[in-house]
């Protein structure tokens, strides 16, 4: 059965190129689409490349099966979905093609000219080019509306980012579909305008160039500068190590040479790189620190100079991308943090202070001819205010009658859309705008990606608490935003596209109604007791009023999650919809409520009928008895009060929990050992 998504059907996918990255692209497609019966064909003209790609892919599937990442049936389906061949005829009739051949514009053009005769008129044609503009790649094709660049990053089966770069002739509707499709299959698509290198590679290769120039200037050895770059920029691995891992020396040398002509005169292959290629060839490796080792720069002055030069270069390189209009600051911050595992330029500038960030960039430009200080940085520094990075994606959806429904999506995919104080504040501002806009009839609140609506609140903020009063303040912020939704005066529908846990479900409980994606796995729950806390964003007050005190108490005291079907049966959600129709269903529901054709029942604000009943006995397992006592107090005390008074009572109970040892034990266990950890509570 094909994968039907948003008006298109995908039965077969073609990947051209079985070298460094093509098999990994194919592996990701197989992993997510094999359950739908989609076949993934990998074609290469060289049999040895086909054999090597097949062998490497099989090894990765086997490792995943051995580690438990893939169930045996899942691994078997992936193997069955993949076909490696030298026969281009195997591409005949595929629905989507991703070309991942050598970075040669003539070769890519010839490949697509051949493919064009094998596929249908509706087949989408994508090039996994790392640098080349789509207008050049697809120039030989008669029809270019269905063409674009989809630039993956190493390792393609695990790195979530895909730069989507349309050409001048690309069909906007097709590009919009691609963004939804890639998001649905677990990637993070980033919209980037067409220019040589796009948005991320000039940063990746530019950081390498800056590091190499620092070595050439005598500021440190290769290993020392490599390790210093990690400290300077928050990199997971240094730039020289990254070249070793990706085999990127030849393409970086070529890319920097082209960038010199196409972007700016500062870019050029450093002498260090050219010497390595001349002496060791394309497989030459850089002498970096081994695993567990660190090459520290002993001289404090030299180390400070390396940190300063790398930070100044990085800020200038990255923010020039915004100056050039290739993508917005929010998109760039998301792309580089996830694709390169680096601190985003705006976050780094804010941490340094905008004046210091500008000074570092200006100092680098003064000593490196051709380097430009970006306007984005100088203009922001002039305001005296830090950069504001939005964790929300907002879109106005026009109804047939001319009304507008505003779609608000929390987008923090690295932490499964978890809520922090910044996101709460941004939500509050966005909701204020919804209420104030006369043409907006209501809103839909959802999350980014297929995994999470909102996975909870920021655990690190709780870990950093210095007093119970600070804990109360964090919970009060969550309560205020949920209450703002509740009292907005316009319908707000929570579209649970994935898990709604903890603070995510509490936010949804403040909405006019909730609908869920009809998908396997858990959908929602309040698992706070596993962390040694209680749901203090309104969970102990609104959930009992929605589904009844006893049922809510059992869920909250055990932290048990509900599937989509269970959530529907319990009344937590009112509808289920296929994932690709979820937002449309929510928008239709907003329109019905706004027009008065539907009137969902409001949560009762008075004390609830079961208030005087004792809570039923519940096996709380390993969880804290001290926390459970305060959970029960919050539940029963809230049931005996009005909703407003119950919410204050919930805050009182949470503040007391923040003074318990078990709260610290639970939070530390989660942070250090992960969400499946069973904290060793002491019940005090």
Image: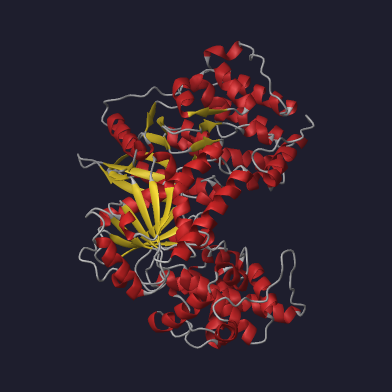
Rendering coords of residue 644 (x, y %): 53, 27
**Left or right of residue 97, residue 73 in this image:** right
Whether residue 391 can be seen here: no
Quarter of the picture containing the C terminus is top right
Which of 230/73 is in front?
A: 73
Rendering coords of residue 599 (x, y %): 33, 24
Up-down relation of residue 265 to residue 621 (above or below): below
Which of 114/294 is in front?
A: 114
Q: Identify the residue at image location x=23%, y=61%.
A: 117
The picture quadrant where one finds residue 619 is top right
How is the rendered protein coloured?
Answer: secondary structure
Q: Identify the residue at image location x=63%, y=26%.
A: 558
**Left or right of residue 295, residue 135 in this image:** left
Q: Identify the residue at image location x=50%, y=20%.
A: 547
Rendering coords of residue 304 (x, y %): 69, 77
The picture quadrant where one finds residue 446 is top left
**Number of marks in picture:** 0
Up-down relation of residue 588 to residue 164 (above or below): above
Which of 422/164 is in front?
A: 164
Which of 36/349 is in front?
A: 36
Whether residue 263 can be seen here: yes
Up-down relation of residue 345 to residue 434 (above or below): below
Quarter of the picture containing the N terminus is top left
Rendering coords of residue 583 (x, y %): 35, 39
Q: Identify the residue at image location x=38%, y=47%.
A: 39
Up-down relation of residue 137 to residue 214 (above or below): above
**Left or right of residue 610, residue 677 in this image:** right
């Amino acid at each position: 059965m094909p994968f039907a998504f948003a008006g298109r059907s995908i039965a077969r996918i073609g990947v051209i190129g079985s070298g460094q990255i093509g098999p990994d692209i194919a592996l990701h497609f197989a992993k997510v689409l094999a359950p739908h019966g989609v076949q993934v064909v990998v074609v290469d003209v060289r049999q040895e490349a086909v054999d090597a790609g097949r062998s490497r892919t099989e090894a990765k599937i086997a490792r995943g099966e051995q580690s438990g990442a893939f169930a045996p049936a899942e691994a078997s389906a992936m193997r069955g979905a993949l076909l490696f061949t030298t026969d281009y005829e195997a591409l005949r009739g595929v629905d989507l093609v991703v070309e991942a051949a050598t970075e040669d514009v003539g070769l890519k053009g010839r490949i697509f000219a051949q493919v064009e005769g094998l596929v249908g008129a509706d087949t989408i044609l994508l090039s996994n080019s790392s640098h080349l503009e789509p207008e050049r790649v697809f120039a030989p094709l008669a029809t270019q509306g269905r063409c674009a660049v989809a630039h993956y990053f190493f390792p393609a089966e695990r790195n979530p980012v895909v730069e989507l770069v349309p050409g001048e002739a690309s069909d906007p509707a097709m590009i919009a579909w691609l963004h939804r499709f890639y998001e649905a299959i677990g990637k993070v698509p980033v919209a980037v305008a067409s220019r040589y290198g796009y948005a991320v590679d000039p940063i990746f290769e530019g950081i390498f160039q800056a590091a190499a120039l620092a070595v050439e200037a005598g500021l440190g050895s290769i290993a020392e500068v490599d390790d210093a770059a990690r400290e300077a920029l928050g990199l997971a691995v240094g730039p020289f190590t990254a070249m070793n891992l990706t085999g990127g020396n030849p393409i970086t040398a070529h890319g920097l040479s082209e960038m010199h002509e196409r972007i700016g005169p500062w870019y050029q292959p450093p002498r260090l790189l050219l010497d390595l290629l001349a002496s060791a060839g394309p497989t030459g490796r850089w002498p970096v620190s081994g695993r567990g080792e660190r090459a520290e720069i002993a001289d404090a002055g030299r180390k400070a100079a390396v940190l300063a030069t790398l930070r100044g270069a990085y800020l200038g390189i990255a923010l020039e991308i915004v100056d050039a209009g290739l993508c917005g600051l929010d998109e760039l911050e998301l792309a580089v943090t996830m694709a390169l595992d680096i601190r985003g330029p705006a976050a780094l500038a804010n941490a340094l202070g905008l004046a210091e960030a500008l000074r570092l960039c200006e100092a680098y430009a003064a000593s490196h001819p051709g380097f430009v200080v970006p306007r984005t940085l100088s203009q922001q520094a002039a305001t005296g205010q830090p950069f504001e990075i939005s964790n929300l994606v907002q879109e106005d959806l026009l109804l047939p009658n001319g009304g507008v429904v505003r779609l608000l999506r929390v987008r923090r995919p690295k932490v499964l859309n978890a809520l922090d104080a910044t996101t709460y504040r941004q939500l509050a501002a966005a909701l204020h705008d919804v209420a104030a806009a006369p043409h907006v009839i209501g809103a839909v609140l959802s999350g980014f990606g297929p995994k999470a609506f909102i996975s909870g609140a920021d655990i690190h903020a709780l870990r950093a608490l210095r007093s119970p009063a600070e804990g109360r303040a964090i919970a009060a912020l969550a309560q205020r935003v949920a209450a703002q939704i509740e009292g907005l005066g316009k319908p707000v529908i929570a579209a649970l596209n994935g898990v709604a846990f903890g603070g995510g479900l509490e936010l949804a409980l403040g909405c006019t109604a909730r609908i869920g994606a009809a998908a396997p796995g858990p959908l929602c729950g309040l698992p706070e007791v596993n962390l040694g806390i209680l749901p203090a964003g309104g969970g102990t007050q609104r959930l009992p009023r929605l589904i009844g005190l006893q049922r809510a108490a059992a869920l909250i005291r055990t932290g048990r999650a509900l599937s989509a079907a269970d959530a529907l049966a319990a009344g937590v959600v009112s509808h289920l919809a296929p994932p690709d129709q979820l937002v449309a269903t929510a928008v239709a529901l907003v329109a019905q409520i706004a027009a008065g054709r539907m009137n969902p029942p409001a949560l009762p604000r008075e004390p609830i009928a079961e208030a005087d009943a004792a809570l039923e006995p519940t096996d709380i397992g390993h969880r804290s008895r001290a926390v459970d006592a305060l959970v029960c107090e919050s539940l029963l005390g809230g049931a005996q009060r009005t909703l407003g008074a119950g919410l204050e009572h919930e805050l009182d109970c949470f503040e007391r929990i923040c003074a318990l040892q078990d709260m610290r034990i639970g939070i530390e266990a989660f942070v250090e050992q992960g969400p499946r950890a069973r904290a060793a509570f002491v019940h005090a």
